[in-house]
Amino acid sequence: MEKEKINIIAIQMESIIANKKANFEKVTNLIDCNIKENTDILILPELWNVGWACDKFIDAAEELENSETIKFLAHFAKKYKTNILGGSFVNKVGDKYYNTCPVINRDGELIATYNKNHLYSYYDDSEGTYITKGDNPFMVNIEGVKIGLTICYDIRFPEIYRAYRKAGADILVNMAAWPLSRAIHWNSLTQARAVENQTFMVALTQTGTLPTGAKNLGHSLVYDYSGNILNEIDTVEGAISATINLFDMYEFRDKCTILNDIQDSYEVLQNV
């Protein structure tokens, strides 16, 4: 571990559906007004450049090599000398489309991507109709800090977070566009991922109203390794920041070594 403390900032926003220019302008203002000196990692929510509108995904797609979204984020990485977890954008690869998180270092270089592993296609949503699911989790190493990347619906699958923890994750991140109608799920699941893995958890989602009339939740939080809330924001657009103390987390893990108690197999027995 190269760092003991990490300063993070997460941007909560209401995306304007299918209007990249307007969303770029909004993010520019939110970053410029909220970023702090010595920010190590800046985080954006899922599909911030297009909004949660599945039928708009294909038109909003970009190829990785000439992505205007990545170029936009690279500008801010260099301007503020910060690493960026860029939420996600629709990434066109051949004839397939992925919900992809780009990771950009302080020099504006793309160093990793994560393709959303679980696609939400229930209750009139149809992500799986347009998007191809990713095959694997991806844990990115940023200056010695290991960060497990997930997007929205991934939060319902504790297996992916346990895999990150067993691989050495220091921080877990979920970048989402989560609905108000499932607020209890969001609050419970994000806190549980922190507690069960003894890991810092950044849970960032969009806010605002969708064209269908449904509302995004807009309750973004940062938890510590015990599930305590370090910072949170309600439904407004803005940002939350936190200083993540990795030394304290490792000291806690050394005293409570729960991962050593995981069994190799959990075969379920039944009476016949």
Image (cartoon, rainbow, N blue to C red):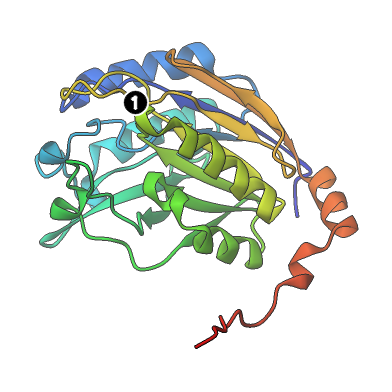
Q: Residue at x 49, y 11 (%)?
A: 33
Front one among 36 and 194: 194
Looking at the rendered image, the quarter that the N terminus falls into is bottom right
Q: Outermost residue toward the front?
A: 272
Question: Is 92 left, or right, of 35 in this rendering?
Answer: left
Expressed as whole percent of the image width and height from the top left, the position of residue 269 reads: 57, 84
Q: Residues within 10 Å of mark 1 (few under 14, many from 20)?
A: many
Q: Quadrant of residue 225?
A: top right
Q: Please determine whether, in this image, residue 107 is positioned above or below residue 121.
A: above
Q: Residue at x 40, y 36 (%)?
A: 74
Question: Is 54 left, or right, of 113 in this rendering?
Answer: left
Q: Quadrant of residue 218?
A: top left
Question: Is 35 left, or right, of 210 in this rendering?
Answer: right
Number of numbered markers: 1
Type of the residue with mark 1: Asn
Q: Please determine whether, in this image, residue 157 is positioned above or below residue 23.
A: below
Expressed as whole percent of the image width and height from the top left, the position of residue 191 reads: 61, 41
Query: Can residue 111 be seen here?
Result: no
Expressed as whole percent of the image width and height from the top left, the position of residue 141 reads: 58, 56
Question: Is 94 left, or right, of 241 in this rendering?
Answer: left
Q: Residue at x 65, y 67 (%)?
A: 166
Q: Which residue is mark 1?
A: 216
Front one among 60 and 129: 129
Q: Please determine whether, in this image, residue 238 is positioned above or below residue 86.
A: above
Expressed as whole percent of the image width and height from the top left, the position of residue 156 reads: 45, 52
Query: Can residue 100 be seen here?
Result: yes
